[in-house]
Amino acid sequence: MELLKKKGFNLIKIQTHWATDEVVEGHYDFSEYDYLVEKAQQLDMYVYIGLTCSRPHPGFIGKFPDCRMVAATVCRSSMTTP
């Protein structure tokens, strides 16, 4: 991270998955990123945490079995391909 700061960057991105950070419904745990966030703070850098939602926690799928990702090529209003 020090190298990024020396090269002029002021932002780091942490990409994670919904299923990784919400193993149990309603309980989010981002503690594994604490070290990176603290290090960025020491270097006066910002942190962006990107949460990928394509993999929800297992309980979500059980609770909402019809839930699915919709491709960008699908017309959302009619749920048919254009």
Image (cartoon, rainbow, N blue to C red):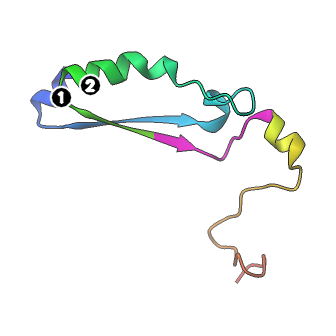
Quadrant for the N terminus, please. top left
Residue appearing at x 71%, y 40% in the figure: 56
Residue 49, horizontal then vertical, whole percent: 43, 38
Amino acid identity at mark 1: Asp
Q: What's drawn in magenta, residue-wise?
A: 50-58
Q: Position of residue 48 (x, y in %)?
A: 37, 40
Mark 2: which secondary structure?
helix
Q: Are marks 2 and 1 in contact (CB under 8 Å)?
A: no
Residue situated in front as seen by the camera: 39 or 4: 39
Q: Which residue carries the number 2 mark?
A: 40
**Cα–Cα gap, marks 2 and 1:** 6 Å
Q: Residues within 10 Å of mark 2 (few under 14, many from 20)?
A: some
Q: Can you tell which mark lies on residue 68?
A: none
Instruction: Tell me where residue 57 sits by quadrant.
Output: top right
Identify whether 71 is placed above or below 54. Answer: below
Residue plotted at (11% across, 33% down): 7
Among the 4 quarters of the image, the one containing residue 52: top right
**Residue beneath disc 1:** 44
Expressed as whole percent of the image width and height from the top left, the position of residue 66 reads: 87, 56
Q: Look at 82% across and 35% down and name the residue there.
A: 59
Instruction: Name the residue type under label 2.
Output: Ala
For label 1, count other residues whose C-alpha is less than 10 Å away and answer few (under 14), some (14-19) or many (20+): few
